[in-house]
Structures are given as structure tokens and as C-alpha cells.
Amino acid sequence: MDVVIGTAAAPLRIAIVGSGPAGLYAAGQLLASEDPVCRVDVYDRLMTPWGLVRFGVAPDHPKIKSVTRVFERTARLPGFRFHGNVEVGVDVSHGELAGAYHAVLYATGTPHDRRLGIPGEELAGSESATDFVAWYNGHPDYADRSFDLSSRRAVVVGNGNVALDVARMLTLSEAELEVTDTADHAIEALRNSKVEEIVILGRRGPVQAAFTNPELRELAELELADVIVDPAELELDATSAAALEMAEQTVQRNVETLRAYATASTRGRPRRVILRFLASPVAIEGNGRVEAIVVARNELVIGDDGSLRARPTGVTERLETGLVLRAVGYVGRPLAGVPYDECRTTVLNDSGRVLDPLSGRPIPGLYAAGWIKRGPSGVIGTNKRCAQETTSRLIDDFRAGLLPEPPGNPEALLDRIRAAGVKIIDYAGWERIDAHERGLGELAGRPRVKLVRRDEQLERASAGA
Ligand SMILES: Cc1cc2nc3c(=O)[nH]c(=O)nc-3n(C[C@H](O)[C@H](O)[C@H](O)COP(=O)(O)OP(=O)(O)OC[C@H]3O[C@@H](n4cnc5c(N)ncnc54)[C@H](O)[C@@H]3O)c2cc1C
Ligand SMILES: NC(=O)c1ccc[n+]([C@@H]2O[C@H](COP(=O)([O-])OP(=O)(O)OC[C@H]3O[C@@H](n4cnc5c(N)ncnc54)[C@H](OP(=O)(O)O)[C@@H]3O)[C@@H](O)[C@H]2O)c1
């Protein structure tokens, strides 16, 4: 009897690489399909799912993290399996996945930091926000990192929400921190922090800042910090003033909020967040470690593409600091065997279909979603629409008979991975870690106490299995 692929008897087998928002939204959409019927295996290099919801979203934003309830519902659907602790490109190759599944969908995110490319960037004390965020969120790759918080002033470079997150984390009081799921090592370090002043540098003006407004307004609620903006830096050039008239609500509100900060009197709090504009770092100085940052005053000029760009005026200033946090965005890295777009640092794709770089045509059965598809921008919900675009195309391709029949199957592949000594953590293993962390949290009045080290996670995942 002929087996009909895409039926309950022979579901379409799909591997999703990455268990962040994009991977989980894609899994939910595929498992909701009745024709074809799909079975989804989600691989992640970590033992814990949810990507940046666990390791990016700031610990003092617990409501945002509650999106995991949606992902948990997906993970409990029949047809879903989680294979944690399996790194694609290390423990299993792309070729092996393609040989075992009808389709492979990459949702691996873009977890590396963009560089400033200025002298002194490599000095101790010049840190990427990427690392700092992963460290305070208890990412196991950063379990042994430490950050020197002995400087009175910290300088955060960038005008996006990540810059606001790290600035806020540096100002939280012990009481504010202790009710979060911040990693214990970070709570300890932040408790002993000497940082009193955080200067946030935006290379362009207030109209061009990438903050979202609730995050900018939230600074006013900090228990220990005043927010300071120099009114002179809010004066708009003619092009920005015209752009503001036409701008979306977020930008208009941001400028209103900044104007309110600039005119408000300070409340004498022990810490300060100073928002600076038209200010670019041009060098980081120090003898063996950061001692100062040289900042150029910019003006805005219209670039070749019509956008407003920052151009140094020649005026510079030197800010003494022992800590520079670069929050200037994220980048992706190539995955072996998967076509890559060097300019965008994403998988080479058209609306989620991965393209052959030579022919420019889609490679049957190969897809991408989330930040590795469209670049490192957008909030969690953006990945739902992004995943929908990709999964619709995957299903269209199946219906058009374009998906190849793989020679192998997932069970043989999983046996092969286990035989190589990889301890695969399934969803029940993660649930054991989760329950343990929540239990510790309950005792401490926190949402959870994270297990940070791989050996602790492995031990807990395996306990009672
Ligand atoms: C610091 C920070 C804070 C943020 N805060 C918010 C917020 O408060 N609210 C909001 O709406 N949005 C926030 N965002 C944005 C949001 O986190 C992203 O839109 C979203 O996480 C992107 O989802 P993704 O699935 O593409 O990638 P990710 O969330 O990065 O997930 C990628 C997953 O792939 C796995 N992976 C990577 N490589 C491999 C491999 N080779 N093999 C197997 N697995 C692999 C990773 O371990 C990870 O689990 C924040 C982003 C950052 C950086
Ligand atoms: N609470 C939340 O909802 C939340 C929290 C965190 C992150 N996120 C989302 O996650 C995404 C990533 O955030 P992000 O902050 O990493 O990126 P982002 O929003 O793209 O901001 C990056 C910032 O870095 C600046 N920058 C880039 N290169 C620079 C350089 N060489 N010198 C000086 N400044 C430079 C950019 O300025 P230019 O504009 O001039 O390029 C921009 O201000 C965003 O979509 C964000 O909204 C959301």
C-alpha cells in the first residue's frame, strides 16, 4: 500500500533548529495544520528552550516572559518533540538533518555582537551588551564571566531598547533585583556595584532613536535613579524637525518624553541615567583597561540613500569611565551547509525560503524564520508573523510536490547523535529543570532561581527520568 505523506499515518517530518520565539511560533503553526499533518522536532544547542525570552528579555520585565505559556501549549501538543543540548553544526550536521526530515527550518537567531570598529574596543572593561545581558540572565556560556562594576561611571553606546535594558539593570536597587530571576552571580555583582552614573550615547538625534516609548518612559520609575537630558541636545535640525511632523507615534512620544525629562527637576536620587544625543564614540582609551571614552559631537547629514546620517563635527570630549557597554545591535554567523547573506548576516532567503546562492532559486525543503531570516530587529510578536510567512511557504511547497523525500529518518538520526555521547534533553527533562527553578523561586519570593551551569541543568533534567 502506498504511504501518503502528510497524513496522520505518515506525517510530514520537520526539523526546526532553535527554540526561541520564531522556532516555537513556527512549530505551533505547523502542528495546527490538518492537511498536511506535521510532526515537529525542535533542536536547540541549550538544554532550556525559549531563546532570548529566557536569555535576552530583562529580568525586571516578567510579564513579557509570560509569552512562554503560549510556547508551553505548543510543546505539549502531540507531534512536538524537543531535543535540547544538540548543537547543529557540532553534534549534528545540516546534511544529516536534511537527510532525515522532509524540511528543515532554521530559527537560530543572531546572537553575536556588532562591533564598533574603534581603537581600544578590545580593552578590558569594553564589553558588549550581548555578553552582559547573557551573563545577568544566566546563559550557561557566560557562567564563568565577570564584569568589573567598580567604576563610578558606565557608558552605554547605542539608542535601542537593549541600551535601555542594560542601563536599567545597572541602576536597579537590591530590592528591585531580588524579586527577579536575574542570575544569582549577577545579583551579587550588581549589589556590590559602584556605578552611579550611566551615560547613554546616541550617535544621531532624539528623532532617530530606536527606543520604544514604554521602555523610555519606564526610566522615570527607577527607584534609585534620576533621568537627565540636556535640553540643548534636543534642539532639532530642520530635517529632523520636518521628520518629526510626519513620524510615527512612537517617535513623537519619545521626543515628548525626552522633553519632559529635560525640563523635570532632578529628585536627588543616588544614581543618574544621562541620555546624550549626536554623540559617537571614536576611541576607547586606557592602559591595559578602559579609563576613558572619546566622544565626537555629530551633526546630521542626508546620506546617499536619503537617510539622515551622523557626521562628526570635529568637536570631541573625553569621558572618564571604567566600563563601556556596546549596545549597537546583534549579528548572525554562517551555519555550515546553509547559504548565508554576508551583508545582512542572515540566512540567504526570500520570504523564508532559503536560496541557492548560485542559481538564486529556493532550495527545496530548506527554510528560515525569525532574526536569522530577517535580521536582529523586532519584538517577540514580530516573529509570529515572520514564522507564518515561512510556514505558509513550506506548506505551499509540500502541496506543490516540491519537498524531497529524505533517505533517512529522525529515529535513526537521534540514535546516531546519542551514540556519539550527546545527552539529548527532551521536553520532560526541561520540565524538570523548570519545576526545580520555580520551586527554588517560590521559596525566595522570585519567579525562579535559574540553574546556570550545564552540569547542574543536566543533573536536574536527568533526575527521576
Ligand atoms: C537583550 C534583548 C532583550 C529583548 N527584550 C525584548 C522584550 O522585552 N520584549 C520583546 O518583545 N522583545 C524583546 N527582544 C526581542 C526578542 O527577544 C526577539 O525578537 C526574539 O527572541 C527573536 O527570536 P528568534 O527565535 O529569532 O531568536 P532567539 O530568541 O535568539 O532564539 C534562537 C534559538 O536558537 C538556538 N540556537 C542557535 N544556534 C543554534 C544551533 N547551531 N543549534 C541549535 N540551536 C541553536 C539558541 O540557543 C536559541 O534558543 C529582546 C532582544 C534582546 C536581544
Ligand atoms: N523591551 C523591549 O521590547 C525590547 C528590549 C530589548 C530589545 N528589543 C528589540 O530587539 C531588537 C534589537 O534591539 P537593539 O537595541 O539591539 O538594536 P536596535 O534597536 O537596532 O538599536 C541599535 C542602536 O545602536 C546604534 N548603533 C549601531 N551602530 C552604531 C555605531 N557604530 N555607533 C553608535 N551607535 C550605533 C543604532 O543607531 P542608528 O539608528 O544610528 O543606526 C541604534 O540606536 C529591537 O527591535 C528592539 O526593539 C525589545
Image (cartoon, grey):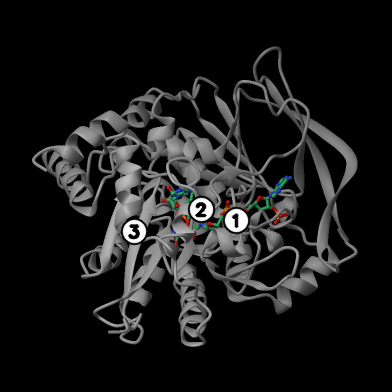
Task: Indicate the secondary structure of the residue bearing disc 1.
Answer: loop
Question: Do residues under tags 2 and 1 come within 8 Å of each other at their CB atoms?
Answer: yes
Where does label 1 land, which residue?
A: 338
Q: Is residue 207 above or below residue 404?
A: above
Q: Identity of the amino acid at label 1?
A: Val
Rate crowding at label 1 as few (under 14), some (14 to 19) or many (20 or more) other CA atoms within 10 Å.
some
**In the image, farthest residue toward the left:** 464
Upstream in sequence: badge 1 or badge 3 = 1
Where is residue 278 drawn, in percent x and y? 76, 49
- For the point 41% across and 60% down, the residue is 100
Mark-to-mark CA distance, 3 and 2: 13 Å
Quarter where residue 64 is shown: bottom left
Determine whether the beta carbon of the residue marked 2 sits less than 8 angstroms from the nearest atom of ligand 1: no
Upstream in sequence: badge 2 or badge 1 = 2
Where is residue 188 drawn, in percent x and y? 33, 25
**In the image, farthest residue toward the front:** 1
- For the point 44% across and 64% down, the residue is 22
Total residue callouts = 3
Q: Identity of the amino acid at label 3?
A: Pro
Task: Indicate the secondary structure of the residue bearing disc 3.
Answer: helix
Task: Indicate the secondary structure of the residue bearing disc 2.
Answer: helix
Query: Camera-side residue: 193 or 383?
Result: 383
Question: Do residues under tags 1 and 3 come within 8 Å of each other at their CB atoms?
Answer: no
Where does label 3 land, which residue?
A: 410
